[in-house]
Image (spheres, rainbow, N blue to C red):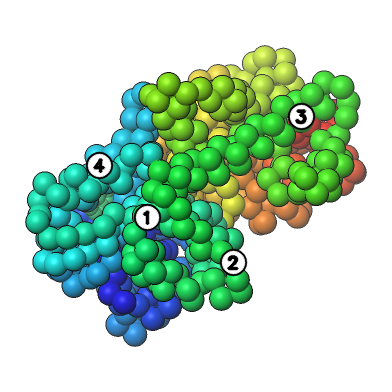
Amino acid sequence: MKIAVVGTGYVGIVAGTCFAESGNTVICVDVDEAKVQALKDGKIPIYEPGLEEMVLKNVEEQRLSFTTDIDTAVKESLVIFIAVGTPPDEDGSADLKHVLAAAGSIGRAMNGYKIIVDKSTVPVGTARKVAAAISAETTHPFNVVSNPEFLKEGAAIDDFMKPDRVVIGTDDPRVSEIMKELYSPFVRTGNPIIVMDVASAELTKYAANAMLATRISFMNEIANICDQVGADVTKVRVGIGTDSRIGMPFLFPGCGYGGSCFPKDSRAIISTAEENGAKFEIMNAVERVNNEQKKILFNKAMSFFDGDLSGKTFAVWGLAFKAKTDDVREASALVLIDQLLEAGAKVRAHDPEAIETTQREIGDKVDYFPHAYEALDGADGLFVATEWNEFRNPDFEKMKATMNNAVIFDGRNLYNPTSLEEAGFKYFRIGAPGVA
Ligand code: NAD
């Protein structure tokens, strides 16, 4: 099948590459000329495990190409995915300006029947707006389909190639057949392709993210109760997760969720509810809890240092909002860094992949170190904000010798307190006893 993907961000580039990998001819389009040029030169603008090899292979085999020319991409394709960003508007609702701009460009380029697929996360009613934006530009026939994406950054290729399910929102059986054909290589083990009406498909994506964000905030509050009563959340987690009605995934407490999805999608579904006369009271609480949780490491440090961090220097390990990505959008580490700087401290930051993206976001307010141990040099304490595997088994003796003061504030519960006690560290973690 001939496919165009509009928007080559985390979702667009992965979707386009995986469709090419399954034998389709895919043209990826972006308005960002530098990004397209980099892709043409074989440079992948994001860090995502396994992506580079797969892009290069499919370009080499001439199934995958990159362009800024949406006109040709649309003319040559039957199915056109919209995978542009939907950032939060000032009131928290999803800003559809990129989606509708893409729809208008698609409409202007049309030369016959097309299927336009909303893959961006968009509120209920967007497919109608996309259809209106296209109709304003063309008399050619088309269908608009909702096909929300559930991939996780850091495991995006695997998630796309082996999805738990594919959700297709359309009322047209011919369109759902074409979409099923396109996705059939990815569901050979029997995972379902679920066809539903457009509004339900659009809402499904937000409901999924709202549920996952709720589990995280729920566990963060349980962890905070553990801290107060002297219980251990790592044990409570196993105690509840083994209940088959609850399940183990997504029960890890931490220093707050970030990323380009949970925060913005939580706010957007609250807006959708309010605009339509419904309530989503739980989500308001989930958001409030998360905003507070992002301050937890700072608060722990403040109480350890008797309320005064001025003139101190701290190492921060982990800038990305989670491991295996370079994405720092709404990352907890950035909130922590702001708080530390505001309190008069200096920051020495390290991340295996996200130094460049952080520098783009916050500039040179902090010092960056490509090696984890260098960031510790002379530090009065270490904060761990991302659960990178590289941080899990460090050389504590070496760390202690490098740091000015052997204390760790761990937002991801990576370490065994006994090992840290033996190494002479003070250790504070989330919802579980450390070494005071
Ligand atoms: P992103 O910001 O990484 O990329 C968006 C891309 O779209 C950018 O390269 C931008 O230049 C391009 N773009 C903007 N307007 C355009 C236009 N008119 N024509 C062509 N290109 C245009 O975004 P992302 O993280 O890939 O997210 C895309 C959508 O997918 C969002 O709605 C997001 O909520 C959703 N989503 C993201 C993830 C994720 O993990 N990142 C997962 C599932 C769903």
Q: Is residue 311 visible?
A: no
| Between marks 2 and 1 in the image, the one whose residue lies nearer the viewer | 1
Neighbor class of circle 2 (other Cα within 10 Å; few <14, some 14-19, many 20+) is: some
Q: Earlier in the sequence, mark 3 or mark 1?
A: 1
Marks 3/4: CA–CA distance: 41 Å
Tag 3 residue: 222
Marks 2/1: CA–CA distance: 19 Å
Marks 4/1: CA–CA distance: 15 Å
Q: Taking 320 as reference, is 162 above or below it?
A: below
Tag 4 residue: 129
Foreground pick, 171 / 247? 171
Q: Earlier in the sequence, mark 2 or mark 4?
A: 4
Tag 2 residue: 191
Residue displayed at 67% across by 14% down: 307
Neighbor class of circle 3 (other Cα within 10 Å; few <14, some 14-19, many 20+) is: some
Marks 3/1: CA–CA distance: 40 Å
Cβ at disc 2 under 8 Å from ligand 1: no
Marks 3/2: CA–CA distance: 33 Å
Label pair 3/1, CB-CB below 8 angstroms: no
Tag 1 residue: 170
